[in-house]
Each structure stands twice: as C-alpha cells, then as structure tokens.
Image: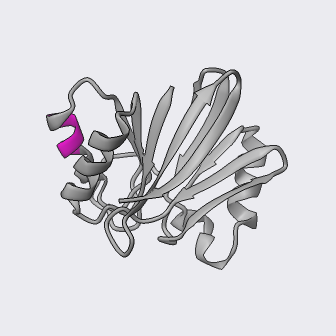
Amino acid sequence: MRILVMSDSHGNKDAILYAVAIESPDLVLHLGDYDRDCAVIESDYPNIPVRSVRGNCDRSSPGPDTDEFTLLGKFFFMTHGNLYSVKTGLSSIVNAAACRGVDVLLFGHTHRQHHSQAHGITIINPGSLGMGKKNYAVLNLRNGAVECELKSV
C-alpha cells in the first residue's frame, strides 16, 4: 500500500495535484492547515480515499483534531501537532503516541521534514506542501514494514 502524507498545504492546490499525480497513492493523509484543500483531491481523484485532521489554521473545519486507525496491521496516530507544542520539542507528542500504543505517528505544523524512530514508533513529519520547498512524504506498507521517503515537489 502506497500512502501520500502531506501537511500545511496552505491553499497550494497545484502542489497537491502534482504530488498525487506523480506518486499515484492508494491513500492520501492530510495533517492539517488547509484541510479544505483535500476537496481538490476528492474532485480530481475520486477513487483515492482521503483522511484529514484540522490544524491551527482550520478553526472553522468540522474535521477532527486527531485520527487513529489501523492499516495492514499498523496502528496510526495523526494530528497536526500544534496541540502537542511540536515546535518546542517532540516529547509530548511521542508520549501521547506511546500511550496509545501506535506504530506510526504523523504530524505537521513545523513545516520541517522529520523521520525518526523512538520507543518502537515511526515518527514522520512530511514538511509543508504549501510553503517553502513544497515537501511531502510517501509511505509504503509491505511485508509488515513501514518504509518512508521524504520528498519535495
């Protein structure tokens, strides 16, 4: 399974459509800040499922602040990151993920790409797709493993 992970798109619909077209994902995950940008994916690629959470710039969004789900035996926790003060460190969000027993933690907010492991958790921030270098992440789930590629448009 191929998953496109994006965050902080801030209205850059061209970058979103480019990333979806080039990566051909089975699923798109949007980690907030202009979660309404997901509508362009749903319109142009109606067969690709999209999950999203709201960020600090999505105050009027009816979407959730967090999402938890299991894919191919891996338990995911996604959130924008602002509620866990990720700009000052990752301890709060990693502790929240560890308490939930997740395998994969996805967050945004900092606009900086990040990929690491801690306490058996794969931690990923795809960066900002809407500002700066236009970053995103691609996850490949296969044979019980989570492979992560950090990419730029």
Q: Residue at x 37, y 40 (%)?
A: 23
Residue 106 visible in rendering: yes
Q: Residue at x 48, y 64 (%)?
A: 127
Vertically, is 22 above or below 36? above
Picture coordinates of residue 106, whole percent (x, y): 57, 50
Q: Residue at x 67, y 52 (%)?
A: 123
Coloured how?
one colour
Q: Viewed as shown, does residue 116 lie left or right of 70?
A: right
The residue stretch that appears in magenta: 39-43
Vertically, is 76 above or below 89? above
> Principal SS element in the magenta part?
helix
Vertically, is 103 above or below 61? above
Residue 67 visible in rendering: no
Quadrant showing the C terminus: bottom left
Toward the right, the furthest residue is: 119
Q: Nearer the viewer, residue 96 or 19?
A: 19
Picture coordinates of residue 152, whole percent (x, y): 42, 61
Picture coordinates of residue 16, whole percent (x, y): 27, 52
Asked if the magenta segment contains residue 110, the reply would be no
